[in-house]
Amino acid sequence: MKLADFDFELPENLIATRPAVPRSASKLLVATPDRLVDRSVTDLVEYLREGDLLVLNDTKVIPARLFGHRDREGNLSKMEVTLLSPTPEGAWRALVKPLRKVRDGELITFAAGLEAELVSRADGQALLSFNRHGQEFDDALALAGQMPLPPYIAAKRAADAQDKTDYQTVFAKTTGAVAAPTASLHFDTALLAALETKGVEFAHVTLHVGAGTFLPVKVDDVKTHKMHAEWGQVTAKAAAQISRAKEQGRRVIPVGTTALRLIESAATAQGQIAPWQGETEIFIYPGFSFKIADALMTNFHLPKSTLMMLVSALMGQHRIREIYDHAIAQEYRFFSYGDSSLLLP
């Protein structure tokens, strides 16, 4: 299984830099093994059944990009910091540019009274200790930080105030992600209410999406690729909801690859699920045996990415190629702010 098997040509104009307004106005490609139907996200109500269980990732994206300066005896150097993940001790792993311009023990100063000491560095990453903690840190970060837009959007435009709303789900709750669970960005309160009226059930899980989600696959033999780790949790309530749906023969449909990867990480070999918490490095590619997920709602993904491999595992490589050829021909918008698909294997 070679990396080139998951490549395709994507016209530059199909990369979305802003979301549809309203969120649920995005196009939705409904794909079964033998049919492709062009609809909109609001039409989910027609395609989901009473009793279907949607699994939603309630992670909350932090404004993880910070711009500040290092002051060394009056000599200022501009610094750009992207927070990656917190440590159990309360420090943050981060990317610092230019890292060579700041020494261990020096401070980087940002807006809103926020400061960070460079504690150490390893493998191109820095460990930062901030002068604010808990709610004080969150409040200062909300003022000083920008949303960490994906590289393919950031290359086209800078993040702005609108992204603090656009790049966050309406049900975001648990702070810790540095990238959004983008399939969930299509849901607004009206759509959630319509689905609830239809009899669709919701289970909330948490997977803190990391910057590693944008890292390219660098090996030709995809089976040798090592996935980045992300922290997640399936609560006792969510596990019970999922177990009950499986026992009753109802469909379990994760919204987004993050929710899917999490519930498959929590699955046992027997196809059961229990409360789970920890870091997952699960890598899903063709040949994977799905234990929990019956379908998937997801956006359109980067060529040669692990997410292309995941959807190929669900639908089959040949079928995914047909789905993506159709999406490109019909000018669906791609990636984080783009349109969506409902994959029904």
Image (cartoon, grey):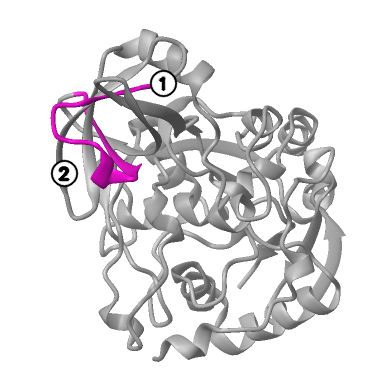
Q: Quadrant of the C terminus?
A: bottom right
Among numbered discs 2 and 1, the one appearing first in the sequence: 1
Instruction: Note whether residue 263 is visible.
Output: no
Mark 1: few/some/many CA within 10 Å (<14, 14-19, 20+): many
Packing grade of label 2 (10 A; few <14, some 14-19, many >=20) is some
Circle 2: residue type: Arg
Residue 218, x across and y down, in percent: 35, 77
Q: In the displayed structure, does residue 261 sit left or right of residue 154?
A: left
The residue that label 2 is drawn on is 121
* The image quarter in which residue 170 lies: top right
**Quarter-wise, where is residue 328 in the image?**
bottom right
Kindly identify the residue that appears in the image at 67 percent across and 83 percent down.
Answer: 9
Instruction: Return the x and y of residue 156 as percentages of the image width and height.
Output: 67, 54
- The residue most toward the front is 74
The answer to which of 16 and 255 lies nearer the viewer is: 16
Disc 2 from disc 1: Cα separation: 20 Å
* Element under disc 2: strand
* Residue located beneath label 1 in the image: 110
Residue name at image x 44 percent, y 70 percent: 306
**Where residue 157 sits: x, y (%)?**
68, 47
Residue at 32%, 18% (x, y): give it: 115
